[in-house]
Image (cartoon, rainbow, N blue to C red):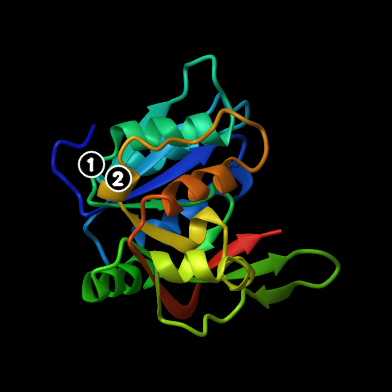
């Protein structure tokens, strides 16, 4: 574990992502906001993912390598290992085959600090790879801050405009507390966010599209 407390802990579960993993890691290492730790958790990959992680870790001491050697596998339990080892004040989840714009962490941290919110949500871009590459932005947010009462009173609107995806959120670690991902194969991130919503005070929205989800 990184003994020096980092402001942001970036948690990346990894399973056979070797084809795109280098691009994902480099997009974190190139962040304009440098006070972070990058936790790479290998979940029994059978390709060269582990070797790629070791190569990058040898050149940057902000990288923490972890292994999921438990009997509980998949993205949920693997992210839980990251949460159990994270030292940051803020938590950011990222997938191993995507990439982030270089200003993502800086913009997100500045927003959550300025607003004093518990979580900041920003836009993402679906990157479609077929015969022709196309991109599709997520919804624009009409409100800059949602309180817990706003969410309770307008849950349908909230669900429609907000991005449910993990990679669109920076979350205060103190809010997460002991909340962990369910040991299920699908929608573990949905369950996680409903648990987060039950304890959150306010959410900030940032109309910038900084995360790229590879499809």
Q: Residue at x 58, y 40 (%)?
A: 188
Q: Is residue 172 above or below residue 183?
A: below
93 horizontally vs 213: left or right = left
Task: List the residue tagged with mark 2.
Answer: 59
**Distance (Cα) linking label 2 and label 1:** 20 Å
Q: Nearer the viewer, residue 160 or 97?
A: 160
Decide: few, some or many residues near mark 2? Use Cα within 10 Å; few <14, some 14-19, many ≥20. few
In the image, residue 168 sits, relative to residue 20, either above or below, namely below
Label 1 element class: loop
Answer with the quarter of the image where residue 155 lies. bottom right
- Disc number at residue 87? 1
| Left or right of 25, for residue 30 | left
Splitting the image into 4 quarters, where does residue 54 fall? top left
Residue 68 rendering spot, x and y as whole percentages: 47, 23
Q: Secondary structure at mark 2?
A: helix
Cβ–Cβ under 8 Å for marks 2 and 1: no
């Amino acid at each position: 574990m990184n003994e020096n407390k980092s402001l942001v802990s970036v948690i990346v579960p990894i399973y056979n992502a070797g084809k795109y993993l280098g691009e994902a890691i480099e997009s974190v290492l190139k962040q304009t906001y440098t006070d972070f730790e990058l936790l790479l958790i290998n979940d029994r990959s059978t390709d060269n993912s582990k070797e790629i992680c070791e190569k990058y870790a040898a050149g940057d001491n902000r990288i923490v390598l972890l292994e999921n050697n438990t009997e509980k596998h998949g993205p949920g339990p693997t992210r839980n290992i990251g949460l159990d080892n994270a030292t940051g004040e803020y938590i950011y989840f990222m997938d191993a085959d995507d990439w982030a714009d270089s200003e993502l962490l800086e913009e997100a941290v500045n927003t959550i600090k300025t607003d004093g919110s518990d979580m900041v949500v920003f836009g993402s871009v679906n990157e479609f790879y077929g015969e022709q590459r196309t991109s599709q932005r997520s919804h624009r947010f009409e409100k800059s801050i949602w309180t817990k009462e706003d969410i309770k009173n307008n849950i349908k609107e909230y669900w429609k405009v907000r991005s449910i995806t993990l990679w669109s959120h920076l979350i205060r670690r103190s809010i997460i507390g002991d909340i962990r991902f369910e040991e299920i194969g699908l929608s573990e991130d949905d369950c996680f966010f409903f648990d987060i919503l039950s304890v959150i005070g306010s959410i900030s929205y940032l109309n910038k599209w900084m995360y790229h989800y590879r499809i």
